[in-house]
Image (cartoon, rainbow, N blue to C red):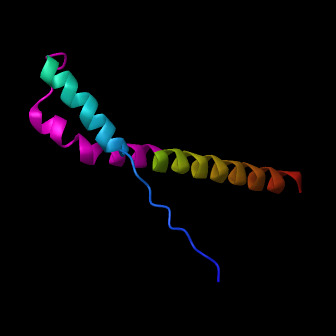
């Protein structure tokens, strides 16, 4: 029989890191952010990363679509 090992991830998520940094900055008085903003950073930090990623993918799709359109138009003029 073969043994299977289960590896579980451990560590702090991106939202957790942002929360800890903002919490330290808020407690030391280095930022004027509201407590609501500090606490909700656990939610909005990963969402912001996801939106940036999706925006980047969207820009790539638009660029590829423009290249396809340009090649289609140039092929019609070559005839």
Q: Quadrant of residue 48?
A: top left
The reply, left or right, for residue 5 in relation to residue 13 is right
Q: Position of residue 51 (x, y in %)?
A: 40, 47
Residue that extends furthest to the bottom in the rendered view of this protein: 1
Q: Main secondary structure of the magenta part?
A: helix
The reply, left or right, for residue 51 in relation to residue 78 is left
Q: Position of residue 11 (x, y in %)?
A: 38, 46
The residue at the point 21 percent across, 25 percent down is 24
Q: How many marks do you count on the picture?
A: 0
The quarter of the image holding the C terminus is bottom right
Residue that extends furthest to the front in the rendered view of this protein: 1
Q: Position of residue 77 (x, y in %)?
A: 83, 51
Q: Is residue 32 visible?
A: no
The quarter of the image holding the N terminus is bottom right
Q: Quadrant of residue 29?
A: top left
Q: Is residue 25 visible?
A: yes
- Along the line of sight, the residue nearer the viewer: 17 or 41: 17
Q: Residue 43 lies in magenta, yes or no?
A: yes
The reply, left or right, for residue 20 in relation to residue 77 is left
Residue that extends furthest to the left in the rendered view of this protein: 35
The residue at the point 32 percent across, 37 percent down is 17
- Along the line of sight, the residue nearer the viewer: 16 or 52: 16
Residue that extends furthest to the right in the rendered view of this protein: 79
Relative to 27, say whether 44 is above or below: below
Q: Residue 33 lies in magenta, yes or no?
A: yes
- Along the line of sight, the residue nearer the viewer: 65 or 45: 45
- Along the line of sight, the residue nearer the viewer: 33 or 63: 33
The residue at the point 64 percent across, 53 percent down is 65
Q: Position of residue 49 (x, y in %)?
A: 41, 44
Region in magenta? 29-52
The residue at the point 83 percent across, 55 percent down is 75
């Amino acid at each position: 029989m073969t043994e299977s090992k289960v590896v579980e991830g451990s560590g702090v998520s991106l939202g957790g890191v942002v929360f800890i940094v903002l919490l330290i900055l808020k407690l030391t008085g280095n930022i004027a952010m509201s407590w609501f903003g500090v606490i909700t950073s656990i939610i909005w930090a990963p969402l912001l990363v996801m939106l940036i990623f999706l925006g980047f993918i969207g820009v790539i799709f638009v660029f590829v679509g423009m290249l396809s359109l340009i090649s289609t138009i140039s092929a019609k003029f070559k005839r």
